Amino acid sequence: MVYHPSFETMGMPDWTPDSWRKRPTQQQPVYPDPAAVEAAVRELAALPPLVTSWEVESLRQQLAEAAAGRRFLLQGGACAESFTDCRADRLTKKLKVLLQMSLVLTYGLRRRIIRVGRFAGQYAKPRSSDTETRDGVTLPTYRGDLVNGPEFTADRRTPDPQRLLRGYERAALTLNFIRSLVEGGFADLRHPEYWDLGFVRHSTRAAEYQRMVDSIGDSLRFMETLAGITAGEISRVDFFTSHEGLHLLYESAQTRQVPHREGWYNLSTHFPWIGMRTADPAGAHAEYFRGIENPVGIKVGPAMTPEWLIDLLDTLDPDRIPGRITLIHRLGHDRIADLLPPLIEAVQREGRTVLWSCDPMHGNTERTSNGYKTRRFDNILSELEQAFDIHHDIGTYLGGVHLELTGENVTECIGGARGLEEADLSRAYRSQVDPRLNYEQALETAMLIARRIQRMNGRS
C-alpha cells in the first residue's frame, strides 16, 4: 500500500492540495518508513517556491495566444533528468539548443515562440511495472532520481524520501543558473552566434542555418536603428519550465496560495503535465490537477478515446479558461492518421479551444536487434508532417511541438542529417530511460518544421 502523509492544509470546500489522497493512486512509490516520508514532505512544504504565480499567469496567457494561432510552443528537454546532470556545461548546452531551435522557428513561422524546458523537476518517471527481475533477483523498478537510483542493488532501488529534497535542491540550482544566463544576456537575440554548439561546423544544413542567423542579425540591427530600441529590450527572452506532475507528494507539498490571487498554484514548475498512465478522470492525478491554477498539459496516447478525452477536459477545465489546456498527442507515425481526427472532431463538437501540440517521440519507440531502445528520425518527422496535415485539413492549428532532446552529442536516435545507424548507438548512448534527439537532430527538426510551415503559408 502506498503511504501518504497527513499534513494539514488550508483548503477550498471541495479541493485541497492533498484531497487526491482519497482517490485511487497510480505510479506512486512505496516507501518503507512512513515517518521519514512525513518528515521529508513537511520540510519540502516549508521551502520557498521555485517559480512565481505571475510567471505562471504569463505562460497561461501566452499559451492562450498560441491556441489562437498567434504563437508557437516549443517544449523540449530530457526524458528523465538525472541529479548528476545538474552541471553548468550540460545545462548551458541544453539551453543553447532550445534557443537555437526557437530562433529557427521564429524565422520560419513569423510567430513568437514560447520556450518551455523539460527540466528543473523532470526527475520522476512512470513505469510499466513496480518491480524488475534480473538473474532471479527482484527489486523495485527505477522510477527516476526523485525516488530511487538506477543501480540494480537493494539499497539504491529502495525509495528514499530524502530524494524529494534533493530533487527540489537540484531544481532550484537549475532554475537559478538558467535565470542568470537569460537575465545576463546569454539569450541576446542580436548575437545568436554565441549559442553555437558545433552544428554549423559539420552539418549538411550548415549554410541554411547560417543564412538564418545572418538574416535575423541584420533585421534586429535595422530595427534598433529605425525604432531606437535599446539593447536591453531585445536581449532577454521568456523561459519557462515543465515536468510531468507524477509524484503527488512532491507536487502537493509545493502547492500553495499566494497574496492577492485566488486559487492554488503549483509553484514547483510553470507547466505540469499529466501522462497517459495517470489520466484517469476519477483518479488521484486528475483530482490534484483540477484544483491548481497552472496551465496543464495532457498527454494523449493511442489508447485515448474521444469520450475519455472529453471527460478529462470536463474534469480539468470546467470553466474553459483560455490557455488552461494543452493537448500533447503522441500517437505514432503509423497510427496518427486514424487516431487523431476523431479526437480533434470530438473537441470541436464540444466547442472547446485548446492548444494542440505534437509529441512525435513516444509513439515511435522501438528496440533494435542489439537491444537498444531507440527512435527513428524519419518516423519522428513523419508523425510531425502528418500532424500538420491533419490539423490543417480539419481546420485546427497545430501550435506546438514536444520533444525529448539534449544539447549533448549523444547517439540514441537513428537517422538524421549524418545518418546514424544501429551500430552507432553504442558509441554515446547515455539515457537511463528513453532515447533523445541529439543537438544536431533537434535543430534539424526545427528547420524542417519551419520549412514545412513556410510551404503551408505559401512562402518560399
Image (tube, rainbow, N blue to C red):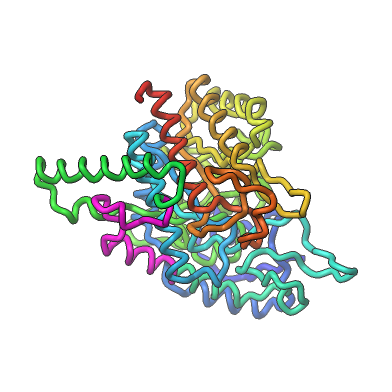
Residue 38's place in the image compared with 424, above or below, is below
272 or 400: nearer the viewer: 400
In the visual, does 30 lie left or right of 15?
Answer: right
Q: Is residue 92 magenta?
A: no
168 or 137: nearer the viewer: 137
Residue 442's place in the image compared with 138, above or below, is above
Q: Residue furthest right?
A: 136
Residue 445's place in the image compared with 116, above or below, is above
Q: Is residue 152 visible?
A: yes
Residue at the image position 66 percent from the left and 75 percent from the top: 160
Query: Percent position (x, y) of residue 192?
Result: 30, 52
Q: How many labels were placed on the picture?
A: 0
236 or 246: nearer the viewer: 236
In the visual, does 305 lie left or right of 267?
Answer: right
Q: Is residue 196 magenta?
A: yes
Residue at the image position 48 percent from the left and 57 percent from the top: 407
Query: Percent position (x, y) of residue 277?
Result: 68, 49
Query: Percent position (x, y) of residue 224?
Result: 14, 46
Q: Quadrant of residue 256?
A: bottom left
Q: Quadrant of residue 260?
A: bottom left
Residue 406's place in the image compared with 169, above or below, is above
In the visual, does 444 lie left or right of 277?
Answer: left
| Span highlighted in magenta in the image | 173-199
Query: Percent position (x, y) of residue 193?
Result: 31, 53
Q: Is residue 281 visible?
A: no
Query: Image quadrant for the N terminus?
Result: bottom right
Query: Image quadrant for the C terminus?
Result: top left
